[in-house]
Amino acid sequence: MSEETPKDLKETEQAVEDAFQFNDDEAFHDVVDSLDIETPTPENLLQNPEALKEHVEISEEVAEEEEVKSANVPEQEEEKHEELENVVHALQDSFQQMATKGDADKPKDDSELVGLGLVLSESATDSKIDEDIQEEANGTEFEDGLPKINTNVNAVDGEFIPPTPGTPPNRSPFESTSSIEDSDDIETYSANLLALNKVDIKNIGPNNLDAREQEEADEPVLAGMAHLFNNRFMKAKKVFESEADTNPLFGFGLGYMAFLKGKFGRAGDEFLEDNTFEEKEIKVAIDILSQTYLVANAQIDAATKKGFGGSVAQYVSSYYTYIKHTRSKSMPHATPATSDQEVKFLPNGVLRAHVIKAECCLQIAILQLAQETVVGYIKCGLNLRRAYTSYSLVWQEYKRMGQAYNEYMDRDTISGIQFGIGAVHLVLSTLPTKILNMVSAFGWKADKHLGFALIKLCLDNDRIRSPSASMLLLGYYTVLTTFAPQILSPIYTQPAIETLLDAQKKYPNSAFFLYFAGRTSRLARNLPLSTQSFKYASEISNAEWVEVDIRQVCDYEIAVNNLMQLNWKEASDLFEKLCSENYWSPIIFKYLHGVCLEQMGMRTEAILAFAEVSQVAARKTGSKSNMELYALRKVESFQAAGYQDLPITCPALEYLYINNSFECMEHTQLNDAMDTVDIALEEIQEREKAEYTVRANEIMPNIDPPDYYTHRGTLLLIKSAILNALGRHQQSIIHLNWIIDHKDRMANEKWIVPYAYWEAGLVTWINGDKLKSRILWETALTQTKFDFEYRLAVRLNLAISRAEDLGTPKPERPKPERGPSTNGRKRLSLAAVRSTTPVV
């Protein structure tokens, strides 16, 4: 055991006091066991034979009790272990079958492959840097339009030999991932807290290692990443913390752990979704990344302040090129390679530090983008600019080195450039204009095809950033497909499966990749397999650093799967559990709990749950997300109507529609959902008939005329989406036309009309009229100030980008009518004024 500090002793004493407050012995022993305290052997015990004999007898009795307990292990636990162990078989077999099926049905059209981002378009970009990257990307072997996935995996320290797909891991899924040698690590690094103390910048010296020496020095980080993605989180934490205050790559590894904890510590989709990160997790991640940024910057300063000779001269020369190109409106172009006798390059340590600086800015920018505030967007833009400028400097040196770049730069720095520039391209290519205008501070246009090529190169390097590249691709494929499954599912599901299979060869039991296995299974409309995957990801993370985070996010995903399967009871229980745990957004979970109770016919319980939503909201500090505001507004509308409108609304199906979930549901559940909508529409019709009967028999009755336009519009929009998901697009036309014809009556629910334009565009897309689809989607983009505006904007941007990939021209918008012409003058002539204005 490591030596305890006074602070540790104080915390231990407090924990022991708390342990004695428990009324039952089991709870007390659980707390004491969690303290991980070694049992001391007093000297007087060894000197006293009678006490020693008594101690031995007690020990034997305890040992006998433990044997009895171990012999009475419930059979259901063994069955549970066997069931979840089979999940690996089911997942890998299912994905292997889908991959095989996808290969047989793979389209051969080049335009389709360009849409995948896996074949570079001829006119992708005009700048030289893009041509250079494309030339490098062309070195990747392609087969039927898709790049071959490199399956050669290098084991780290002989610890891990990846099995082939379809073969389960050798160990039991519930076998501890920590070996005996890790016991000291758990004692020393058992705290879940991630933190990087304020570093002493003045004591950080320059990094003078050359490329090969740097690769050797970075082997612990490579091992740390292997630990991280093999669920050995505490071991990875130990590796990264060992030099985090002096070595920026170690600090970045720690920051990346905090980044993942933030991403998996809340529900919903990735950073593009309308959900927010846990504020505390965001702050921890940003603090660590900011400190790492300072460490990297200190290494650069130390390297350039060594003297006023050649090192400063070459740094100023390179920095001049860096500033010149960051002020230009295009991506940096390559400078021709020069012989070693004519030019000197920046040291590898300086280039490495610049890449890490850029990566820190990139991760912080993604976290700020997820906050979905104007201030967050502005900060995101500034950090993306900083990231890009640092990447530009390193890229200039990389291209000046020519074919000899590998002699001057270590492989992890090279893959860092590929990952960073590729990630910036992919992130910016997904953002709609409304967000991009606030985020982007660049003059160059993002190119997703270039981003894919660079990420693929990084993935094939099998270095420190390779698993991060797999995570980025899986996040891109699954999240974007969730936004627009009708358009993107045919082209992104297959690459997602192949990327997942490749990742599971190297990390078959990784909780992160198992999570994406659940998301991918959902996109393939295999909800039972998706639920199994989430359960396995949760179980395999037990007693680990992200146990609570993974379990809660998996519980949320399982609850959503139950919603899609119309299993209201199971979904209700999980939402109530997440609300009680104060996870992510208790407001939304309490609302969804009430929604499920209403669908179960338990109206009284549902009303009580809805009444608690405002109480939960009052306890929340800070701003509320769009989804939380939506839930509060829905509850207020229910209360204003005395909960009499519940029979003519379908709030559960409305939530599923907003999250674009119908495309992931089985046809049986879709037909049941449509029956529910029809019942609500019939109830509206009966109410209108009754109210018109009153007005037909009484002069000026004391009731308002029937006004169910908003309710009917919402239900017809849901029904249209269900019909589209069932492939019955023609039947949805009449309902969408009714919504658009009565768009002026939808003032209370402004989001209905733009979403109706989206659904209408899907109908014409399926019917082959892609130009009309783009016209409808462009029209939807003109709508503003409604719920989930940015969510729909992302969806529309993805669909329009897909239309552009297929060569659909941009529709011409009608020009606004102009007034009297000035004929090029700054003001109207007096004659024109006299002839067009009245005399006052």
Image (cartoon, rainbow, N blue to C red):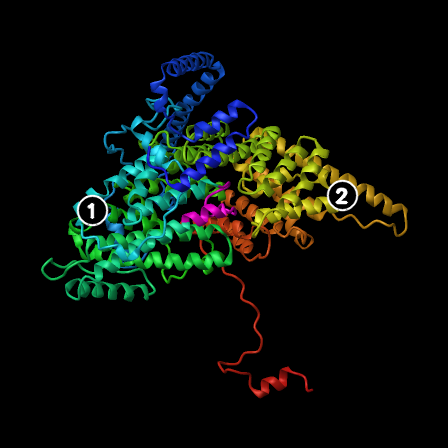
Q: Nearer the viewer, mark 1 or mark 2?
A: 1
Disc 1 secondary structure class: helix
Disc 2 secondary structure class: loop
Q: Mark 2 sits on what residue?
A: 642
Q: Quadrant of residue 239?
A: top left
Q: What residue appears at the point 58 percent right and 47 percent down from the top-left corner? A: 627
> In whole angstroms, how far apart are the C-alphas of marks 1 and 2?
69 Å
The answer, for residue 747, to whether it is visible in the render is yes
* Residue 272 point in image, percent of width and height: 47, 48
* Residue 824 point in image, percent of width and height: 48, 80
Of the numbered discs 1 and 2, the one sitting upstream in the chain is 1
* Residue 225 point in image, percent of width and height: 31, 38
Q: What residue appears at the point 58 percent right and 39 percent down from the top-left corner? A: 656
Res. 463 mark: none
Q: What residue appears at the point 28 percent right and 66 percent down from the top-left corner? A: 324
In this picture, which residue range is highlighted in magenta? 266-285
Left/right placement of residue 645 relative to residue 411 reads right
- Looking at numbered disc 2 in the image, what kind of residue is underneath it? Gly
Mark 2 packing: few (<14 Cα in 10 Å), some, or many (20+)? few
Q: Quadrant of the C terminus?
A: bottom right
Q: Mark 1 sits on what residue?
A: 214
The residue nearer to you, when weighing 716 against 26, is: 26
Q: What residue appears at the point 33 percent right and 57 percent down from the top-left corner? A: 388
Vertical placement of 12 versus 195: above or below?
above
